[in-house]
Image (cartoon, helix red, strand yellow):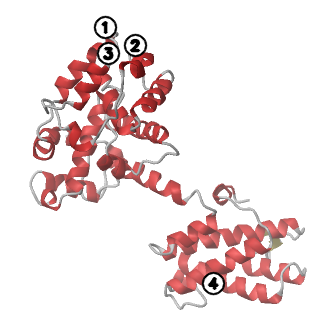
Amino acid sequence: MNMNPADRDIGGFFNLKDLLSFFPELGKRYLGAPKFAELEDLFKPLREGIEPFSLKHVELIQDREKKYWGFLTFWKIPEISEADLKPLAWAFKGLKRKGTDTSIIENLFAVIKNIEVVSCILRFVEPANYAIMSPPVENLLGTRGSTQTDKYFHYLSDLHELKAHYNFNRIADVDLALWSLARILNADNLKNEYPFSGVYEAYKKTSNHVKTIMARNSLAAVYDNEPIIVARLLCDTDPILGGMIAGRQLELAINNLMRRNGVSLKTHDRDGKLIDKSIYEKLRDLKDKQVITPGEENDLNAAWEIRCACTHPKESRKFDKELPAKNDILWMIDQVAAFIENYQIALSLEAQYLGS
């Protein structure tokens, strides 16, 4: 097995490239043994510029007689004329992943009206750089995009990343491996059947690169929100993490408000060394300067206690070495959100790392 050290974790190894060898069996079971290599040969003249793109190729991809695959089981192509395809007649010659292919994808989509069908055509014309965007793989990776074509570009980018990480030869093969993985993950019978059960266990027990892309894509929608909203959204699944994020926002907001009002963030210790003030000292100073009210100081001190209990409960004053309840964390998030809104404090996720 060709193992990538980046995918090593407790429990063993996971290598997406190994899934490519499972496609013939899984394709036979669930797709009727598609003949992809034969289709690639039929579309090769387009890539080489030997013949123009025409209705002949539209019929080939539809394959009404199911000689090569069951296209019409999954997709439908609208009525198209030769005139519709004329602008694309020689557009596939020397097809590449980026740059000049942007227009061909947009133009092909304008005619076909379905990005998955567009992806099918491109996959067989140029399997080295294109792949079919099917729901099982798309859902596995959590692919996003503002438009269908934008979504396909993101999808291809993810597959190129996996191609490099797992040393695949072609993007189309990355797709076949991902489809096989999605098939195993979505079928309870395969999870318990050798050799698919071994793949399932390896995938489940490793922090592999497929999961990295899936998490990145899935969390992108969440992290499009304001940081305090992210904290609230996380509370249903991981309230402690939500509390940690809200606590960081509270700390940044307090520092921001102190700077705006000319209140020093530093103090001297017993040896005269300049050190950061504690949050309790900062809140007291803001109250003494009449920037915040005594009631706000009390509420924010209580919110900070909840933050401390989320981060290191053994040192918490209030929660006696126990993690705070979800309702306590939600209350804390509400206090922090109100504080940020009332004082018009602008924070970003980047600020968490810059410390501003």
- Which mark sits nearer the N-terminus, 1 or 2? 1
Task: Residue at 65% x, 55% y: name it.
Answer: 350
Compared with 134, 278 (above or below) is below
Task: Residue at 54% x, 86% y: name it.
Answer: 327
**Disc 4/disc 1 C-alpha distance (Å):** 72 Å
Compared with 307, 276 (above or below) is above
Which residue is disc 1 drawn over?
50
Name the mark on residue 46. 3
Q: Amino acid at mark 1?
A: Ile
User: Can residue 54 be seen at all in this image of the molecule?
Assistant: yes
Task: Residue at 74% x, 69% y: name it.
Answer: 253
- Which mark sits nearer the N-terminus, 4 or 2? 2
* Left-right relation of 190 to 217: left
**Corner quadrant of residue 290:** bottom right
- Circles 1 and 3: CB atoms closer than 8 Å: yes
Closer to the camera: disc 4 or disc 3? 3
Name the mark on residue 305. 4
Q: Amino acid at mark 2?
A: Trp
Kindly state the secondary structure of the residue where label 3 is placed. Answer: helix
Kindly state the secondary structure of the residue where label 4 is placed. Answer: helix
Name the mark on residue 91. none
**Disc 1/disc 3 C-alpha distance (Å):** 6 Å
Residue in front for this viewpoint, 99 or 348: 99
- Circles 1 and 2: CB atoms closer than 8 Å: no
Kindly state the secondary structure of the residue where label 2 is placed. Answer: loop
**Disc 4/disc 2 C-alpha distance (Å):** 67 Å
Q: Amino acid at mark 4?
A: Glu
**Corner quadrant of residue 61:** top left
Local crowd size for mark 2, using a 10 Å CA cut-off: few (<14), some (14–19), many (≥20): some
Task: Residue at 13% x, 38% y: name it.
Answer: 24
Name the mark on residue 90. 2
**Disc 1/disc 2 C-alpha distance (Å):** 9 Å
